[in-house]
Image (spheres, rainbow, N blue to C red):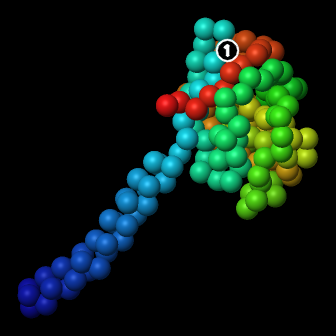
Amino acid sequence: MFAPLFRTALLGLALTAPAFADSSETTLQKDSMMTKIQFTFGSEVLTATLDDTPAGQDFAAMLPLELELKDYHGIEKVADLPRKLDTSGAPRAYKPETGDITLYAPWGNLAIFYKPFQKSNGLVRLGTFDGSLAPLVKAGDTRVRIAIID
């Protein structure tokens, strides 16, 4: 009686083990494709991670950039981008959270949310900040340099 149960348990482990291996391998591959960037303004440096999406990759291809970030309605910082981004495959709408780096496709501008906002058509997530945005919010309207971290 013990042997059949033991064999069944071993078979169950053997069948699930490859799924765990594949899952962790996929996670490692996904993490290795993420692009780390930094926002530098004044003496402050904030880091962020771009999503591995066509829009995130296209934004990374633009870097380094120097932009003038302006406060918009006490919710986000915005800046015009030099060209449109590839939004193929992006959802039609997105609900931004604090720290999200997004593109507002209808206007072609970068939008960095420091407060959550409602789901909005045309909003495409590019990535997110790795930590607090407090220094960026405190800076008000500011010139920022965005670059890939080597």
Name the one closer to the observer, 84 or 43: 84
Look at mark 1 in the image and give the residue it sits on. Answer: 41
For residue 115, what is the image quadrant?
A: top right
Is residue 36 found left or right of 72 in the rendered image? left
Residue plotted at (83% across, 45% down): 84
On the image, which quarter does residue 46 sit in? Answer: top right
Relative to 60, is 12 above or below?
Answer: below
Considering only vertical position in the picture, is 143 above or below 148? above
Q: x and y percent of residue 93 in the render? A: 80, 54
* Amino acid at the residue labelled 1: Phe
Identify the image quadrant of residue 2.
bottom left
Residue 101 x %, y %: 70, 37
Q: Position of residue 116 (x, y in %)?
A: 74, 36
Q: Is residue 80 left or right of residue 91?
A: right
Residue under the point 61% across and 8% down: 43
Residue at the limit of the structure toward the top, as seen here: 43
Q: Position of residue 1 (x, y in %)?
A: 9, 91
* Residue 25 in view (yes/no): yes
Disc 1 crowd, CA 10 A, few/some/many (<14, 14-19, 20+): some
